[in-house]
Amino acid sequence: MAAQPIGRHFLQIPGPTNVPDEVLRAIAAPTIDHRGPEFARLTREVLDGLGPVFGTTNPVVVYASSGTGAWEAALVNTLSPGDRVLAFETGHFATLWRDMAEALGLRVDFVPGDWRRGVDPDTVAERLAADREHTVKAVCVVHNETSTGVTSRIPEIRNALDQAGHPALLLVDTISSLGSIDYRHDEWGVDVTVSCSQKGLMLPPGLGFNAVSDKALRARESARLPRSYWDWKPILEANRRGFFHSTPATNLLYGLREALRLLDTEGLPQVFARHRRHAEATRAAVRGWGLEVLCADEREHSAALTAVVVPEGHDAETIRELILDRFNTSLGAGLGRLAGTVFRIGHLGHFNDAALIGTLGGVQLGLRLAGVPVGEHGINAALDVLGRKETA
Ligand SMILES: *Cc1c(COP(=O)(O)O)cnc(C)c1O
């Protein structure tokens, strides 16, 4: 049995992420009456603060749920049994969303992918142009595929829908991008933006979100998939008075209010620039080690995490275990078909240069100790990026 580790744990998985002390302290307050006036003020502050983070002036529905729950909410509020939806095999999470849609009784056109690229806007355009009868009711896209470290280009995908003149709803999973990577629900014409608390928003798990367009709200009126807990309407009605229709996750909402304040203080453009810079430094380290970044398209590198391909003959799980054991640092495992062949470095949320240097130092040494032949230049290449004058 290893000795109790000393010092802070480095939680460098791409979610849940490190929770700032301010947020932890905010959560550690007495739970209040969720039907009283103080709660109504909390609801208004939180709902007002969420809008800018989603880039919307429309409602954001808040659930006591994981991100998976918020996926289900997006589907059951907008679609009917047997509806066709277009989805793309960008990785593990896109595949799980497909499975859920099928389990709910939807027919999914799942465009195959190699788990190294995002959604191809040209394919979206082709598929929708071919659907002259407009039988496809929704297009489901994972903005940042957390299993691969690939970010799909939502504005170009929106453009593809518009070019095809197709009325399908656009449903986007921003679970690992919101609050880390530039995102604009209104400007990009997204109908439902799905997200949750434990990634870029720097909270513990337990809150799910749906930002909804007017078109999505209209679709809800005729959507016939069974829904009860996930129904937007009773929640939005109660929200107007400052409440929720069932008991909300009060203490997580305290944390959310604080996390939104932190994001606002840093400023979203700076938050996004910080994530891009840490991602660039991480990729420089990976190249310096002589290893390969999984993402195969320069335009699609994720700013939130980097998936690293482990050379043949080595097991990513052994490397992760060694790094956890020696450096008290958690890295993300390879998910689904990537199990054992990649590990993922999360660089999102509450994070800074020193934490990245510590993480990459642990990875470099861990790779060496695991017998993976790596160039010693990796960490220095990352330092070179971090040492450049900040431009953002
Ligand atoms: C984490 C994640 C999910 C799943 O969220 P849960 O809170 O675990 O249900 C879905 N999609 C993406 C892109 C994710 O990163």
Image (cartoon, grey):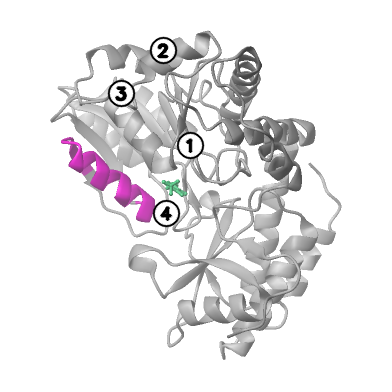
Q: Are marks 3 and 4 in contact (CB under 8 Å)?
A: no
What residue range appears in magenta?
A: 90-109
> Which residue is disc 4 drawn over?
117
Q: At which x and y percent is residue 299?
A: 54, 49
The residues bearing labels 3 and 1 have C-alpha atoms spaced at a distance of 15 Å
- Indicate whether residue 47 is drawn in magenta: no
Q: Do the residues labelled 2 and 4 touch (CB within 8 Å)?
A: no
Residue 304: % across, % down:
59, 51
Quick check: 217 left or right of 59?
left
Left or right: 354, with 55 as reference point:
right
Checking the image for residue 195, the label placed there is 1
Label 1 or label 2, whichever lies nearer to me, is 1
Q: Can residue 344 be seen in this view?
A: yes
Q: Which residue is drawn at 48% across and 32% down?
A: 155
Please name the residue that numbered disc 3 is placed on.
77
Q: Is mark 2 on a helix, strand or loop?
A: helix
* The disc label shown at residue 214, or none: 2
Question: In 3D space, how far apart are the residues under numbered discs 1 and 2 (Cα atoms)?
Answer: 18 Å
Helix, strand or loop: magenta stretch: helix
Q: Which of 231 and 28 is in front in this view?
A: 28
Q: How far apart are marks 1 and 4 (CA)?
A: 21 Å
Given this view, does label 3 or label 2 mark the residue nearer the observer? 3
171 or 230: nearer the eye?
230
